[in-house]
Image (cartoon, rainbow, N blue to C red):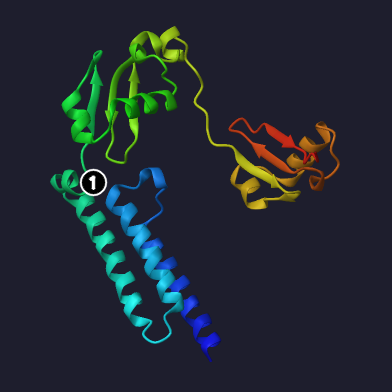
Amino acid sequence: MDIVKVILTSLLSVVSLFIIAKLIGHKQISQLDFFDYITGITIGSVAAELATELESPWKPLIAMIIYGLCSVILSFVASRFQRSRKYINGTPTIIMDNGKLYRNNMKKAKIELSEFMLMCRQAGYFNVNDIQTAVFEHNGKLSILPVSDKRPLNPNDMDIKVKPENIQTEIIMDGRILEENLKRRGLDMTWLNKQLAKQGYSKASEIFLGVCDSDNSLYLFEAKEK
């Protein structure tokens, strides 16, 4: 019976964790603020306890629900009331601007000079003279604005007008034709067969991936074995 109870409580733990994760939302680790990070760890720990709690599984389940609701409520408050964001999520802190480092702001953000230099190097700036402004975000990341003559060249700098690009549409995936995507582009099987023959293929099963751009140009990729 104990094995059956463990299976049931484990399944309950997985289902509860899945539902709470869906309610909290899909955030990457780099997007989590400190409270969300701690809450996630706590909910995971409680879920592990729930999986092996045979006598009173409802206790860790209630704890998981409370932690999840608190996270959802705080997220709702932060999105609805702008003034609350600086208390819930924190505020960005300017660490460097116009060639000047702000020691008090570094202390406020609780980062040391060596840590700041590490973040600069990780962002690709090995020379601090190339940095116009550095902002320490509330999620622990450093946002850097390079000086004007060090930023990447773009078409506007050269007065070049470029044609806007659209997302490519998958037409063939793993040798299977996605007919709905084909119809969405206003195309048909006759067009696809002509394109395949033009590029030297007799059937779609030979193609690993086929994508179509805004000009209805078809790009085909074969699956190559190492």
Question: Residue 148, percent across and down?
Answer: 34, 11
Amino acid type at mark 1: Asn
Q: Nearer the viewer, residue 80 or 148?
A: 148
Secondary structure under the numbered disc 1 in the rendered image: loop
Judge whether 100 appears above or below 75 on screen.
Answer: above
Question: Residue 46, percent across and down?
Answer: 37, 69
* Residue at x 83% of width, y 36% of height: 197
Where residue 91 sits, quadrant-wise, is top left
Whether residue 94 sits left or right of residue 201 in the image: it is left
Whether residue 124 sits left or right of residue 185 in the image: it is left
Q: In the current view of this chain or complex, which residue is farthest to the bottom?
A: 1
Where residue 18 sits, quadrant-wise, is bottom left
Where residue 13 sits, quadrant-wise, is bottom left
* Residue at x 28% of width, y 60% of height: 72
Q: Which residue is mark 1?
A: 89
Question: Residue 129, percent across and down?
Answer: 34, 11
